[in-house]
Image (cartoon, grey):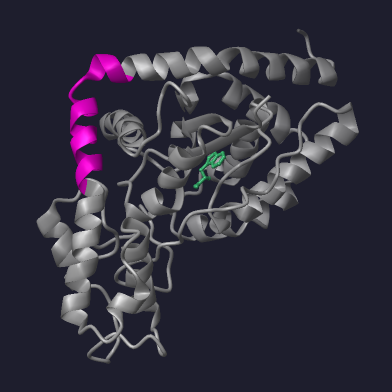
Amino acid sequence: MKARVLSGVQPSGNLHIGNYLGALKNWAEIQGQYESIFCIVDLHAITIYQQPAELAAKIRETAALFIASGIDPEQSSIIVQSSVSGHAELSWLLTCVTPLGWLYRMTQFKTKSEKQETIGAGLLQYPVLMTADILLYQAALVPVGDDQSQHLELARDIAQRFNSLYGETFVMPATSLPSVGARIMGLDDPTQKMSKSAPGTGHAIGLLDDPKVIAKKIGRATTDSSPAVDLENISPGIANLLAIGEACDPTFRKETAASMRYGDFKKRVTEAVISRLEPIQKKYREVIADPGYLEGVLADGRQRVLPIAEETVRKTKAAMGLYV
Ligand code: TRP
C-alpha cells in the first residue's frame, strides 16, 4: 500500500511563484508515489476575516491552480476542507487534549496576532485544526515548508498525547518528505519568505500575473550595489533570483549568470519565469472556464476521502467514550 501524503494551502491572498516552486510543483512530482490528498484549507483562512464572496471565488481559483500546476485529480484527491465535516469535528476533540501553553508558544500565532486588533480564538486554534487535517487521514507524510515545522511538531505532540490518554488511535506523521522544493524569498525583501499576504506589489510574483507585470516586478527586485553577478560574493537578492531562475528552467545554470550585468541577468530570469508560467496560466484559464468540471473534481475528491475521515472520527469518539 502506498503511504498517504497530505498537505494544504489557504485560499487567501494570491498564490505565487514561491507556492508553486516550493510546494505545488513538488506535489505534482510526488503524487504518483503516494496516496495524495491536497486540501484547500478554507477553515484556516477564516481565522482572519475574509470577505465572503472573495473567499468563495478564491476557493475555486486555488483548486484550478492546483490542477494547472500539474496536480492530477485522477491520481490525487483535491478537497475543500469545509466540505468534509470531520476536519472541524476532529479539531474539537483534539482541542480538548491540547494544553493552552502549547498554543501560546507558536511563533506564527505570536506574529499573526500582533497584526490583529481583535484576536479571534480561531487564530490560537489554527494549529489544532491543522493537526486535525493530518490525523483525520492518518497521513504518514506532510510536505510543508520549514515555516510550518513548529506546527508539525505540535501535531506530533498532540497525537502522542491523545494516544497515551486514550490508547493508540493516530498514526504519527513524519515531519516532512525527504526532498522539498525551493524556498523562494520576497523580491522586495530577500530575507523574508515570499508571502501571500505581504503588502505591496513588488513582493511576490503571482501565478496569474501578466508577463508585463512579471518583467516589471523582477526588474525592480532588490539586488545590491554591484553592477554584475559575482558568484564569489552572492547577496541574498541575487541568490533568490538565481534560485527562481534555476527552479523555473533546468537549463538555467548559475555559471551562465556569472558576470552578467544585473539588467541582462534579470531579463534572463524574467524569461525563465514567463515561460514556466505560460502553460500553467493557459491550463488555469481552461479549468476556470469550466465550473462544472471543477465542481466535479471537488465532489470526487470529497467522495474519495469521506470514508477515511468518517472512520477516524468514529474511532476517535469511541476511544474517548463519546456516543457513537
Ligand atoms: N498551515 C499551513 C500553511 O500555512 C496550511 C495547512 C493547513 C496545512 N492544514 C494543513 C499544511 C495540513 C499541511 C497539512 O502553509
Q: Is residue 292 magenta?
A: yes
Number of residue marks: 0
Q: Residue at x 37, y 18 (%)?
A: 297
Q: On the rendered structure, is 69 left or right of 179?
A: left
Q: Assign the magenta stretch its main secondary structure.
A: helix
Q: Residue at x 25, y 41 (%)?
A: 280
In percent of width and height, residue 132 lies at 64, 32
Q: Taking the image as drawn, is residue 97 in sight?
A: yes
Identify the image quadrant of the N terminus: top right
In percent of width and height, residue 312 lies at 70, 19
**Depth order, front residue of 221/251:** 251
**Depth order, front residue of 41/104:** 41
Q: Which residues are magenta?
A: 278-294
Q: Is residue 155 above or below residue 319?
A: below
**Depth order, front residue of 36/201:** 36
Q: Is residue 4 above or below residue 148?
A: above
**Depth order, front residue of 253/67:** 253
In percent of width and height, residue 232 lies at 42, 90
Q: Residue at x 64, y 40 (%)?
A: 141
Q: Is residue 198 magenta?
A: no
Q: On the rendered structure, is 214 left or right of 242?
A: left
Q: Is residue 270 above or below residue 117?
A: below
Q: Residue at x 47, y 34 (%)?
A: 41
| Residue farthest top in this picture | 324
Q: Taking the image as drawn, is residue 9 in sight?
A: no
